[in-house]
């Protein structure tokens, strides 16, 4: 079955459905869940290839859920962050081999974890509208630098959206737009690298089915959550993301 044992295929099928559900409900963490689980049961290149098309297609749907006009408006609203992510990612990609991954994971995971725990403790951080452009530029640069080096560029955006108090629907849409741009680059890169090939593309395409099924179920939950519930679960997922990044840092150092 796509070159895998049946138990391997059905395990990653179930993991993908769960990852799609989380993404539909909260708007992020799909690659984190899939990569962590796939790496334990698949060869590294197969694990990477398997998640590429589900991530690409679900981000496309997430970005366009309210239609192209809403997506374009979100791009305009956060153009400074998006532009800085793309520029900084292009600049930092060449440094990926020279900067220790463990250091990058620690420098990103530590502040993200501290921010989420601070917010969950009931101490919100609200950004002044007068400083929004500067903060967008700063978080975009940080996200892009980390994205080019480690492949992780989402958490600074989520911190920005939470700090600005962006409404739930727009927060999820903006995440979809930014993640889609990164996923498109990742797809093209690995078509060129050969990781996505005649053997791995069918597996990755097949996993789009559970990804979308899970995502649609997640959308149903997201639509029922009020703003406070959505914010709380976003912060919980940020805590888990931060802990995972710190864990990866420690595993590289030990």
Image: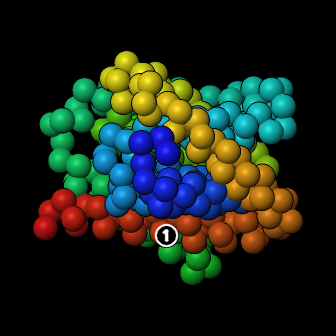
* Residue located 52% across and 38% down the image: 204
Residue 235 percent location from the top left of the image: 59, 68
- Compared to residue 5, the image places residue 148 above or below, namely above
Residue at (42, 30) in percent of width and height: 199
Name the residue rendered at 75%, 26% in the picture: 72
Locate residue 239 relative to residue 99 in the image: left or right: right
Q: Nearer the viewer, residue 158 or 243?
A: 243
Q: Residue tagged by mark 1?
A: 239
Q: Can you say which quadrant of the picture contains the C terminus?
A: bottom left
Which SS class for mark 1? helix
**Whole-percent x, y for residue 74 in the image:** 73, 34
157 or 14: nearer the eye?
14
- State whether residue 150 appears in this view: yes
Residue 132 visible in the snapshot:
no
Residue 102, quarter of picture: bottom left
- Which corner quadrant of the image does residue 64 belong to? top right
Q: Residue 49 at what x, y percent from top left?
A: 43, 37
Q: Is residue 212 left or right of residue 200?
A: right
Specify the quadrant of the image occupied by residue 245: bottom left
Placement of 193 over or under 222, stated as above or below: above
Q: Residue 166: x percent and y percent?
A: 72, 51
Left or right of 53 in this view: 171: right
């Amino acid at each position: 079955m796509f070159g895998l044992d049946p138990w391997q295929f059905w395990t990653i099928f179930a993991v993908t459905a769960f990852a799609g559900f989380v993404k539909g409900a909260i708007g992020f963490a799909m690659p984190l869940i899939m990569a962590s689980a796939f790496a334990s049961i698949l060869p590294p290149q197969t694990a990477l290839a398997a998640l590429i098309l589900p991530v690409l297609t679900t981000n496309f749907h997430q970005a366009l859920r309210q239609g192209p006009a809403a997506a374009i408006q979100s791009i305009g609203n956060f153009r400074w962050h998006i532009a800085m992510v793309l520029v900084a990612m292009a600049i930092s990609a060449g440094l990926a081999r020279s900067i220790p991954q463990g250091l990058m994971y620690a420098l990103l995971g530590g502040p993200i974890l501290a921010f989420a725990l601070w917010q969950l403790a009931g101490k919100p951080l609200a950004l002044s509208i007068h400083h929004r452009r500067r903060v967008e530029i700063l978080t975009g640069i940080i996200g892009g630098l980390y994205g080019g080096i480690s492949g992780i560029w989402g958490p600074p955006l989520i911190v920005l959206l939470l700090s600005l108090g962006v409404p739930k629907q727009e927060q999820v849409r903006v995440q979809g737009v930014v993640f889609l741009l990164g996923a498109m680059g990742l797809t093209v890169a690995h078509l060129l690298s050969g990781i996505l090939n005649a053997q791995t593309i069918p597996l990755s395409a097949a996993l789009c089915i559970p990804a979308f099924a899970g995502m649609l179920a997640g959308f149903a939950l997201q639509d029922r959550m009020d703003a406070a519930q959505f914010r709380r679960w976003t912060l919980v997922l940020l805590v888990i993301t931060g802990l995972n990044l710190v864990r990866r840092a420690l595993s590289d150092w030990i």
